[in-house]
Amino acid sequence: MPLTRDMLIDGKDVPALSGRTTKDIDPYTGEVYATVPAAGPEDVTRAVDAADAAFAQWAALAPFVRRAIFLKAADLLESRTGQVVETMAREAGGTRPWAHFNARLGADILREAAAAVTAPRGEVLSAQQEGVLGLAVREPLGVVAAFAPWNAPVILGVRAVAGPLAAGNTVVVKPSEDAPVACGLLIADVLREAGLPDGVLNVVTNDREDAARIAETLIADPRVRAVNFTGSTNVGRIIGMHAADHVKPAVLELGGKNAVIVLDDADVDYAVDAVTFSVFMNSGQICMSADRVLVHASLAEEFKEKFTAKVAALRAGDPSHPETVVGPLVSASAAERVAGLVRDAVAEGATVLTGGGRAERAVHPATVLTNVPRSAELYYGEAFGPLCVLETFSDDDTAVALANDTDNGLTCGVITENATHGLAVARRVRTGIVHVNDQSVADEPQAPFGGVKASGYGRFGGRWGIEAFSNTRWVTIATQQARYPF
């Protein structure tokens, strides 16, 4: 029997004022997993009402009290790992290892948020005027609009709200239509049980056809003072434009066209393992997934043989099976989109090294292509599925040029046994994140996370995430009476 959930507004579970609902579909079985409210603009307004009313009290709450809430929520989330595994499999086709990682990292993000609550914020400034003490003080902004995606639902759902809340803001979150429970309601449940006051976090669910109207209403509300969005570059552009229209800061973490570069001094067996993880974890549906594998010509044949054999042996299908690596994509249409990218590339002259063929419902086989020409859609388009392109290079200059031949700039891996060589190459790749002697997929809650170019701007994580959702205010204290010219 499908799960039935309401929205969370002002600490209460409530339906949409219109009474409308929408279905949350299991991508593997095609069955309805859950039914949630289909909010309208009036529901967005009452969520902002609640967040705005709760702001002053939350911002003024003693830091150690706020910190205790985040620490308790972290423990609660970890204790619900079994629930996370089931929910992610049913909503988004997430495999067990991926769900376990989501629960663990989500809990660590909450712990980092707890640490940030009591971390020093601000500076003492030198002042030109005699007898004046100057301060630069970090203060919360107010209500933050957060948009949480489905692909790493617990990690990114927690990240969407933890930094803003730790900075003293209140939040209205719009979770993805594809995972409203895992990236919204489940996280709100944990924080509410941990003692988060009513109205501090509000969750508004919606039907897909209403998504644009809900987003516009939320961003346009004058009480919303900042926006954060994680998702595709195309939608991120729209969100960024709405935020700019209303002169509101935004943190945008968008798509990637990431590369892993295997240098001539790499350990081939290690490189094969690293690249396989980078491309196929969560069926390639990670913003950091490697779409492109660039291998030095001297290692190309050995790497290709070992890599294609390993990929061909990956178990695909039921996400609940403990040995499944390539689970279903988020929907049958997503799998068909990936199959279309493969067909187009082959028609343009690409070669299939392994995989290819037709998708079976939402499951697409793990696929490796080579000789993909620039005319193919896949050359510049994000795969966001179990698909990569293998290319070779003859020298570092060529490798860097290939890695940078994209509008995106999120992350990169440079695999080498020579850290000096790897760092020299890494410094030339234009991405917000780069990993030397590792692949492209990594996330730590204390690190600055975000991209450049069409992969977005602003940073989540650590002190950078707090700064993104707070304002610097100049405060002066005159220790003696000033003299004025008139």
Image (spheres, rainbow, N blue to C red):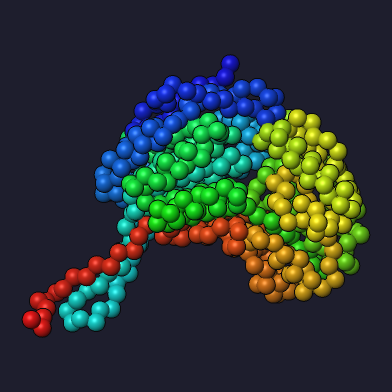
User: Image quarter for residue 321?
Assistant: top right
413 and 400: which is toward the camera: 400
- Which residue appears at 32% of the width and 57% of the height? 139
Question: Is 68 rendered above or below residue 401?
Answer: above
- Which residue appears at 70% of the width and 38% of the height? 334
Q: Is residue 78 something that shows in the picture? A: no
User: Percent x, y for residue 160?
Assistant: 48, 46
Question: Is 260 rendered above or below residue 62?
Answer: below
* Residue at the extreme left of the image, as rendered: 486
237 and 259: which is toward the camera: 237
- Which residue appears at 18% of the width and 70% of the height? 477
Q: Is residue 127 something that shows in the picture? A: yes
The answer to whether residue 432 is left or right of residue 318 is left
The answer to whether residue 181 is left or right of residue 286 is left
User: Percent x, y for residue 426?
Assistant: 68, 69
User: Image quarter for residue 126?
Assistant: bottom left
User: Percent x, y for residue 473?
Assistant: 30, 64
